[in-house]
Structures are given as C-alpha cells and as structure tokens.
Image (spheres, rainbow, N blue to C red):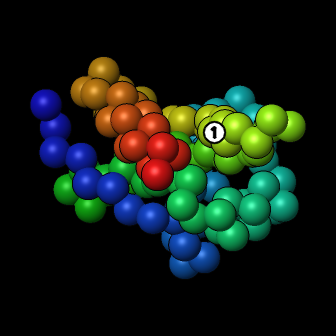
Amino acid sequence: AVDVKFGDLTTRNFEQLRILNYMTLPVIYSEQFYNYLTSMRRYSKLAYIKDVLVGAISCKEDVEKDGEHVCYIMTITVLKPYRRYGVGSKLLEKAIDECLV
C-alpha cells in the first residue's frame, strides 16, 4: 500500500484540482463549480503521495424534504499512473467519514 496524505481544497490550490480534473475526467467544469467547491471546503479532499497531487474527491451535502442529510459525490479521480493502489478507495473512505460528522 502507498502512503497517501490528505489536504484541503483552498483558494490557493484549486487550480491544481482544475488541472487534475481536466486531465482525468471527460467533463470540463465551469468556474462556478470551482467557486462552489472552494466555498464548501469540507467536502473536497486532495490526495498526495510524496507531496505530489495524485487524486481528489469533491462532494456536496443536501438536506432532503424529511430533514435527512445526504452526501453526493460529484467527482472522484486519480491520475492514471497512481491507479490500482487504493488511492480512490482511501479518498472515498475519507469523504464518508467526513460526511458522517
């Protein structure tokens, strides 16, 4: 297993997330998408291996009509050379833990 460190999304590093998503996902997200993510930092996590950004997850929380809180995964991605090492699974576990708080 690889040693994955997590970081928060901030206004200083969101451009790295934009590039990661551009390189790995089939959709190009708008400026509003990234503005939303930086205003809701709790639901975005970045994954680093040896200080290199290799993956990320972005989630949003909604409140249902019955008052139940639900967490939706909007994006989850890992750079191709780092896939199959459990990075995506660790990102998912981290998001689940934080959405349950």
**Which of the image's four quarters has the N terminus?**
top left
x%, y% of residue 16?
A: 53, 61
Q: 59 and 48: which one is in front?
A: 59
Q: Residues within 10 Å of mark 1 (few under 14, many from 20)?
A: some
Q: Residue at x 62, y 45 (%)?
A: 59
- Which image quarter: residue 12? bottom right
Q: How many marks?
A: 1
- Taking the view exactly as shown, the residue that stands out farthest to the top is 84
- Residue 5 versus residue 99 in the image, above or below: below
Residue furthest bottom as drawn: 12
The answer to whether residue 74 is visible is no
Frontmost residue, 59 versus 35: 59
Residue at the spot x=52%, y=46% of the render? 99
Residue at left 30%, top 21%?
84
Residue 79 sits in which quadrant?
A: top left
The residue closer to the viewer here, 7 or 18, is 7
Extreme front residue here? 66
Question: In the drawing, does residue 33 fall left or right of residue 96?
Answer: right
Closer-to-camera residue (55/70): 70
Q: Quadrant of residue 2?
A: top left
Q: Where does the image place residue 28, in percent across and percent down from the top left?
A: 77, 43
Q: What residue lies at 24% left-to-right and 47% top-to-bottom?
A: 4
Amino acid type at image mark 1 = Cys
Residue 40 visible in the shown view: yes
Q: Position of residue 6 (x, y in %)?
A: 33, 56
Which residue has dot 1 on it? 71
SS at badge 1: strand
